[in-house]
Image (cartoon, rainbow, N blue to C red):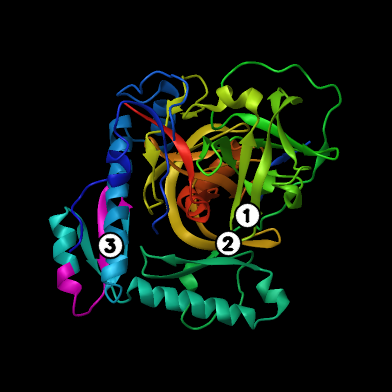
Amino acid sequence: MLPPRLSPLRSATRKTGIRRTALAAAAAILLCVPTAAVATAEPDQSPDLPAGLAAAVARDLHISPEEYLQRADLAQEVATFTTTAQRDYPDVFAGSWLDAGRAVVAVAQGSSADTVKQAAESSGFTVRNVAKSEAALREEKSAFERWLEGQPEAVRSLVRGAVIDTVNNTVAVRVDQAGLPMPSFIDPARVIVTAPPMANENAPIPAGEIAGTNRAFTAGDGYASGSDGVSLRCSLGFNGIDHRTGDTVNITAGHCNPDIPSAGHGNAAGIYELNGNQPGPLLGVFEKSVLGEQDYSIVRISDRAEGQFSNSGVRIPGSAPMVIEGVGTPVVGAPVCKSGMRTGFSCGVINAVDQTVRVGDHMLSQSFSANICALPGDSGGPIVTGRLALGISSASSVADFSFCVIPNLIGAITGDAPQLFGQPLDVVFSDNPGLAVFTNSP
């Protein structure tokens, strides 16, 4: 029996006060800049979105704050439905997504097709009949990856990855240039040419560290990471706790650690407060950094700075921070917004989930992407849907631009919108039992 329309991740966090909540998982270009116990008190979330978030939603998504929240909630209902359908009806379930605020469930032919259709319709979802189940599409994606392994390096190096395109009931492939040979089961119309990712250069830490402050640090604030004279500029992700140790932590990008092998050791690289471009006091050290199929870091906050990170806020320029109410699952068509030290707060729509994409010399898997411009410095920053934490910024298709206005204009004219690739939080939690983000619910 498929579940009714409800949002357990959201409803489970609707309690007064702040708490630390552990939510485990169900089912380009690097963006660093070279160069749940009770937490501290914070105001309850207003029924209305913060002014800066409402402005970004209107500017980028052209919908009202109420519609933004409604679509975000609906996406989580779809995610709940999908988890059960994938498990119980893999022979016919073919994916689900939002289409301009309408929930769609795709169903292939099979003995249990009517059961899935009835469950979807009773939940208020629109049913679409398609040729291939999601399981069949996964087999095609695996077949493509096996085919790619047998190709010459000249071909493999130009393929950026593949994703199950549920909306078109096919497998889509990202490539650096048009005209590459493809197996017969790949639809040429779904071979998408995108700009190749590139890594950023490192820069030395400027001399003359500045004094620290006592301000609160929220997701989206900038920091410097440093080790042996090498420094990167990135954005803080979500604040939280590691229940295994009791440490206050921040979840940010793996590639923001300039010395990944040292993570968790006595010589681990640290993160430092930023005032302008000048690094200040040490805020924490990298306890764990992963850069390969995943891209995340867990930063253990120092005892001195722990109180400054005991909040569930997301930085919104020009407004009070938005507080996180729970953790969500990426869904195609869901509205999302990101915060980062370089480009601030901006919004878009998820266009792919559970995808594989080559970023530099590693292949990022299980990532999601959205049509949002992000630039170096935004790495590690938060991606939210509604008031739910969703992921952290990992890579971008336009990180070689100096400003977002140009790639956004190009995207508006050509339809080739900038792409932000995100590391899903639910995957991070699955890898690290006991890890949680701070949440607050009115």
Residue located 46% across and 30% down the image:
312
User: Which mark, by number, is residue 357?
Assistant: 2
Q: CA distance from mark 2 to mark 3?
A: 27 Å
User: Which mark, by number, is residue 218?
Assistant: none
Read off the residue under disc 3: 84
Tell me the quarter of the picture where residue 212 sits.
top right
Structural crowding at the residue carrying mark 3, measured as other residues with C-alpha within 10 Å and reported as few (<14), some (14–19) or many (≥20): some
Q: Nearer the viewer, mark 1 or mark 3?
A: 3
Residue located 29% across and 24% down the image:
47
Q: Which comes before the other along the chain, label 2 or label 3?
A: 3
> Residue type at mark 3?
Thr
Q: CA distance from mark 2 to mark 1?
A: 7 Å
Read off the residue under disc 1: 28
Query: Is residue 28 located in the magenta-colored stretch of the structure?
Result: no
x and y percent of residue 92 in the render? 26, 74
Determine whether 129 is above or below 217 in the image. Answer: below
Q: Secondary structure at mark 1?
A: loop
Q: Which comes before the other along the chain, label 1 or label 3?
A: 1
